[in-house]
Amino acid sequence: MTKHPMTKEGAEALQTELNKLKKEDRPRITEAIAEAREHGDLKENAEYHAAREQQGLVEARIKQIESVLAHAQIIDVTKLNPNGKVVFGATVTVLNIDTDEELTYKIVGNEESNVTANKISINSPIARALIGKQEGDEVIVEAPSGNIDYEIIEIQYI
Protein backbone atom coordinates (compact mmCIF):
# COMPACT_ATOMS: atom_id res chain seq x y z
CA MET A 1 0.00 0.00 0.00
CA THR A 2 1.46 3.33 -1.05
CA LYS A 3 1.79 5.98 1.64
CA HIS A 4 1.22 9.62 0.69
CA PRO A 5 3.19 12.39 2.40
CA MET A 6 1.34 14.78 4.68
CA THR A 7 2.59 17.44 7.06
CA LYS A 8 1.95 17.06 10.76
CA GLU A 9 -0.23 20.19 10.64
CA GLY A 10 -2.28 18.79 7.75
CA ALA A 11 -2.89 15.52 9.58
CA GLU A 12 -3.93 17.41 12.73
CA ALA A 13 -6.35 19.58 10.73
CA LEU A 14 -7.95 16.49 9.15
CA GLN A 15 -8.19 14.78 12.55
CA THR A 16 -9.91 17.88 13.97
CA GLU A 17 -12.39 17.88 11.07
CA LEU A 18 -13.00 14.14 11.55
CA ASN A 19 -13.68 14.60 15.26
CA LYS A 20 -16.15 17.42 14.53
CA LEU A 21 -17.96 15.34 11.91
CA LYS A 22 -18.24 12.34 14.24
CA LYS A 23 -18.98 14.10 17.54
CA GLU A 24 -21.03 17.12 16.43
CA ASP A 25 -22.37 16.84 12.89
CA ARG A 26 -23.32 13.15 12.88
CA PRO A 27 -25.41 13.34 16.14
CA ARG A 28 -27.05 16.61 15.00
CA ILE A 29 -28.12 15.05 11.69
CA THR A 30 -29.36 11.88 13.39
CA GLU A 31 -31.49 14.05 15.65
CA ALA A 32 -32.81 16.01 12.66
CA ILE A 33 -33.78 12.76 10.90
CA ALA A 34 -35.61 11.52 14.00
CA GLU A 35 -37.44 14.82 14.33
CA ALA A 36 -38.39 14.83 10.64
CA ARG A 37 -39.77 11.26 10.98
CA GLU A 38 -42.13 12.48 13.67
CA HIS A 39 -43.76 14.81 11.14
CA GLY A 40 -45.39 11.88 9.38
CA ASP A 41 -45.33 10.86 5.71
CA LEU A 42 -41.67 10.50 4.67
CA LYS A 43 -42.36 10.53 0.93
CA GLU A 44 -43.24 14.22 0.91
CA ASN A 45 -41.15 15.33 3.88
CA ALA A 46 -38.51 17.77 2.57
CA GLU A 47 -36.83 18.09 5.98
CA TYR A 48 -36.35 14.33 6.14
CA HIS A 49 -34.90 14.11 2.63
CA ALA A 50 -32.56 17.06 3.26
CA ALA A 51 -31.31 15.53 6.51
CA ARG A 52 -30.74 12.15 4.81
CA GLU A 53 -28.80 13.84 2.01
CA GLN A 54 -26.69 15.72 4.53
CA GLN A 55 -26.11 12.47 6.41
CA GLY A 56 -24.81 10.86 3.22
CA LEU A 57 -22.41 13.74 2.60
CA VAL A 58 -21.09 13.65 6.16
CA GLU A 59 -20.60 9.87 6.09
CA ALA A 60 -18.78 10.10 2.74
CA ARG A 61 -16.46 12.81 4.11
CA ILE A 62 -15.77 10.73 7.23
CA LYS A 63 -14.78 7.75 5.07
CA GLN A 64 -12.61 9.94 2.86
CA ILE A 65 -10.73 11.48 5.81
CA GLU A 66 -10.25 8.08 7.48
CA SER A 67 -8.83 6.70 4.23
CA VAL A 68 -6.48 9.66 3.75
CA LEU A 69 -5.18 9.40 7.32
CA ALA A 70 -4.79 5.62 7.05
CA HIS A 71 -2.60 6.04 3.96
CA ALA A 72 -0.67 9.11 5.15
CA GLN A 73 3.02 9.22 5.88
CA ILE A 74 3.10 12.06 8.37
CA ILE A 75 6.27 14.13 8.14
CA ASP A 76 7.29 16.68 10.78
CA VAL A 77 9.62 19.04 8.92
CA THR A 78 10.97 20.45 12.19
CA LYS A 79 12.54 17.06 12.94
CA LEU A 80 14.26 16.68 9.55
CA ASN A 81 17.88 17.51 8.77
CA PRO A 82 17.54 18.81 5.19
CA ASN A 83 21.00 20.45 5.05
CA GLY A 84 19.63 23.71 3.65
CA LYS A 85 17.76 22.05 0.79
CA VAL A 86 14.12 22.37 -0.18
CA VAL A 87 12.25 19.30 1.11
CA PHE A 88 8.66 18.27 1.67
CA GLY A 89 7.12 20.53 4.31
CA ALA A 90 9.55 23.41 3.76
CA THR A 91 8.35 26.97 3.35
CA VAL A 92 10.15 28.53 0.39
CA THR A 93 10.32 32.18 -0.64
CA VAL A 94 11.15 32.66 -4.31
CA LEU A 95 11.69 35.68 -6.53
CA ASN A 96 10.21 35.70 -10.02
CA ILE A 97 13.23 36.91 -11.99
CA ASP A 98 11.12 38.42 -14.78
CA THR A 99 8.61 40.35 -12.63
CA ASP A 100 10.58 40.88 -9.36
CA GLU A 101 7.58 39.43 -7.51
CA GLU A 102 8.32 37.54 -4.28
CA LEU A 103 6.17 34.53 -3.49
CA THR A 104 6.18 32.21 -0.49
CA TYR A 105 4.98 28.61 -0.71
CA LYS A 106 4.77 25.74 1.73
CA ILE A 107 5.22 22.35 0.06
CA VAL A 108 2.54 19.96 1.34
CA GLY A 109 0.68 16.78 0.41
CA ASN A 110 -2.10 16.61 -2.18
CA GLU A 111 -4.92 16.52 0.40
CA GLU A 112 -3.76 19.66 2.17
CA SER A 113 -2.79 21.82 -0.79
CA ASN A 114 -4.58 25.18 -0.95
CA VAL A 115 -3.30 27.77 -3.41
CA THR A 116 -5.08 30.66 -1.66
CA ALA A 117 -3.16 29.76 1.54
CA ASN A 118 0.10 29.39 -0.48
CA LYS A 119 0.23 25.65 0.24
CA ILE A 120 1.26 23.82 -2.91
CA SER A 121 1.18 20.11 -3.60
CA ILE A 122 4.43 18.17 -3.69
CA ASN A 123 3.28 17.08 -7.16
CA SER A 124 2.87 20.62 -8.53
CA PRO A 125 5.33 21.86 -11.17
CA ILE A 126 6.70 24.53 -8.80
CA ALA A 127 7.32 22.07 -5.95
CA ARG A 128 8.90 19.51 -8.26
CA ALA A 129 11.29 22.19 -9.56
CA LEU A 130 12.19 23.39 -6.05
CA ILE A 131 12.80 20.04 -4.31
CA GLY A 132 16.50 19.47 -3.62
CA LYS A 133 17.56 23.05 -4.40
CA GLN A 134 19.17 25.55 -1.99
CA GLU A 135 19.00 29.26 -1.24
CA GLY A 136 20.44 31.27 -4.13
CA ASP A 137 19.68 28.57 -6.71
CA GLU A 138 17.76 29.49 -9.83
CA VAL A 139 15.03 27.14 -11.00
CA ILE A 140 12.96 27.02 -14.14
CA VAL A 141 9.35 25.99 -13.60
CA GLU A 142 7.63 24.48 -16.60
CA ALA A 143 4.14 25.96 -16.22
CA PRO A 144 1.24 25.59 -18.66
CA SER A 145 1.66 29.28 -19.60
CA GLY A 146 5.38 28.80 -20.29
CA ASN A 147 8.64 28.62 -18.38
CA ILE A 148 9.03 30.80 -15.28
CA ASP A 149 12.45 31.61 -13.79
CA TYR A 150 12.67 31.80 -10.00
CA GLU A 151 15.49 32.42 -7.56
CA ILE A 152 15.23 30.82 -4.12
CA ILE A 153 15.48 33.61 -1.55
CA GLU A 154 14.77 31.76 1.71
CA ILE A 155 13.97 28.26 2.98
CA GLN A 156 12.30 27.73 6.35
CA TYR A 157 11.53 24.51 8.17
CA ILE A 158 8.62 25.54 10.36
Image (cartoon, helix red, strand yellow):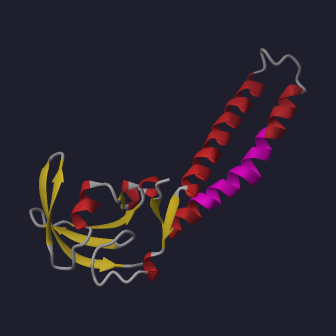
x, y percentage for residue 132?
A: 25, 72
Horizontally, residue 62 falls left or right of residue 7, namely right
Residue 116 placement, left or right of 134: right
**Quarter of the view holding residue 46:** top right
What span is in magenta? 14-29
Residue 157 is inside the magenta segment:
no
- Position of residue 18 measured from the top left corner of the image (x, y, whole percent): 65, 54
Tell me the quarter of the picture where residue 131 sits. Answer: bottom left
Q: Is residue 153 above or below residue 117?
A: below
> At x 47% / y 63%, what residue is drawn?
6
Q: Total label count?
A: 0
The answer to whether 46 is drawn above or below residue 56 in the figure is: above
Q: Pick the quarter of the image with the C terminus.
A: bottom left
Q: Is residue 18 left or right of residue 82?
A: right
Q: What residue is drawn where x is 29% and y is 72%? A: 92
For this rendering, which residue is in front, 93 or 88? 88
* Residue at the left extreme of this rendering: 98
- The residue shown at (22%, 78%) is 134
- For the point 64% across and 47% down, which residue is it? 62
- Mainly helix, strand or loop, the magenta region? helix
Q: Nearer the viewer, residue 19 or 85?
A: 85
Does the segment drawn in magenta span residue 17?
yes
Q: Find residue 97 and report its horizontal and vertical position in percent.
A: 11, 66
Q: Quadrant of residue 26?
A: top right
In the image: residue 35, left or right of residue 100: right
Rendered location of residue 139, percent (x, y): 15, 66
